[in-house]
Image (tube, helix red, strand yellow):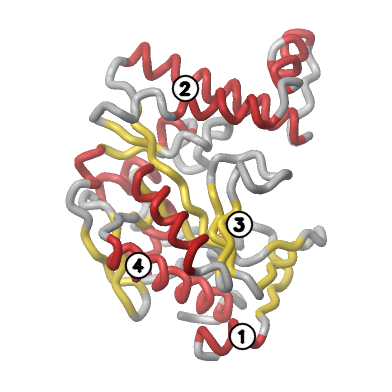
Amino acid sequence: MTDEYGNLELHKVLLAAMKDIDKICRENGLRYYLYAGTLLGAVNFKGFIPWDDDVDIVMLSNDYNKFKSIIERDYGERYKMMTFDNTANWYSKMSKLQVLGTEIITNNGEAAPIFVDISTLHNMPDNKLSMLIQRKKIEFYNLSLAVLSGAVIPTSLKSKLTIGQMAKQGKDKLGKKLDTALCRYDRKRTKYVGIMCNTICPNPYTGKCGYITDRTEINWHDNPRYVEFEDTKLMTISNIEDYLDWQYGTKWREPYPKEKRITKHNVREYQIDSKVREWIGK
């Protein structure tokens, strides 16, 4: 690890959390997969991307549900699972494993604990028309939730009559509708699985929407492999290069432009209390 970008202590906390995730999953026969920039860092840097400020992992739904229960039952003094269902002002189906006793403060003054992003994988239909229908439903409910949260303001008459009206149903009803769309094919073994909760904005590397970009072949998850990550090894999918080509395009091995080597979450500073410092060996 390096402190070139002021992230050394942050990365120490995240690495300790990742080791706990790995320990829990090993002991309980669960699978998790390094994903997105975290997997890219594992391949290109043998650990964290030096300027990155979070961790991305994905889990199959059954493994995620068991993992969440273990965290809530046995690790409540160290972590909190922030989810759509237990957090009033959180409108995403992506969960966050928050490290208690820590705080990230952004340049606009917002504060939240250091976290690991944990996304649940859902099955995508094999039929292209069914895939399009699922994608459109997920996008519609996500946009409605964005309107409800205030992140999106409908301006046209059409948007006011569609997503504006849907948003009035409230978070709980919208969450159930979104779950129905996300889980529609989970009882089948289909070719692809995806996190499907990042559907609105296109991937900056490929220009593709999240529904398309954030997917992997299910057989890549059948036989997980371990990759070097800092001073340990962590679990991920079998077809790493195929996934990175799909997610980032074929130039992911090339050095990232210096002007873009910045944190994703606009971090101004972070705070770590004494108990956490003792835990991470500071």
- Where is mark 4, residue-wise? 22
Q: Residue at coordinates 60% horizontally, 24% vertically from top-left?
A: 141
Please report the residue visible at 52 percent of the width from the left and 85 percent of the height from the top: 279
Circle 3 packing at 10 Å, graded few (<14), some (14-19), many (20+), is few
The residue singled out by tag 2 in the image is 135
In the rendered view, would you say 49 is above or below 223? below
Please state which of the two labelled residues, at mark 1 or mark 2, is closer to the viewer.
1
**Which mark is first along the chain, 4 or 2?**
4
Q: Position of residue 164 (x, y in %)?
A: 75, 18
> Residue 78 shows which numbered tag?
none
Gap between marks 4 and 1 measured at Cα: 21 Å
Residue at horizontal 29%, vertical 15%? Answer: 127
> Residue type at mark 4?
Asp
Disc 3 marks which residue?
264
> Is disc 1 placed on a helix, strand or loop?
helix
Q: CA distance from mark 4 to mark 3?
A: 24 Å
Query: Measuring 40% from the left and 63% from the top, which residue is drawn there?
Result: 41
Q: Earlier in the sequence, mark 4 or mark 1?
A: 4
Image side of residue 234 versus residue 172, left or right: left
Which residue is tagged 1? 275
Marks 2,4: beta carbons within 8 A: no
Cα distance in 3D space between marks 2 and 3: 26 Å
Marks 1/2 in contact by CB < 8 Å: the verdict is: no
Nearer to the camera, 124 or 132: 124
Give whichever of discs 4 and 3 has the lower sequence position.
Answer: 4
The reply, left or right, for residue 110 in relation to residue 258 is right
Give the residue type that dot 3 points to. Answer: Lys
Query: What amino acid is at disc 1?
Result: Lys
Residue 8 appears in which quarter of the rendering? Answer: bottom right
Q: What's the CA distance linking mark 2 and mark 4?
A: 32 Å
Q: Disc 1 to disc 2, how far (Cα)?
A: 44 Å
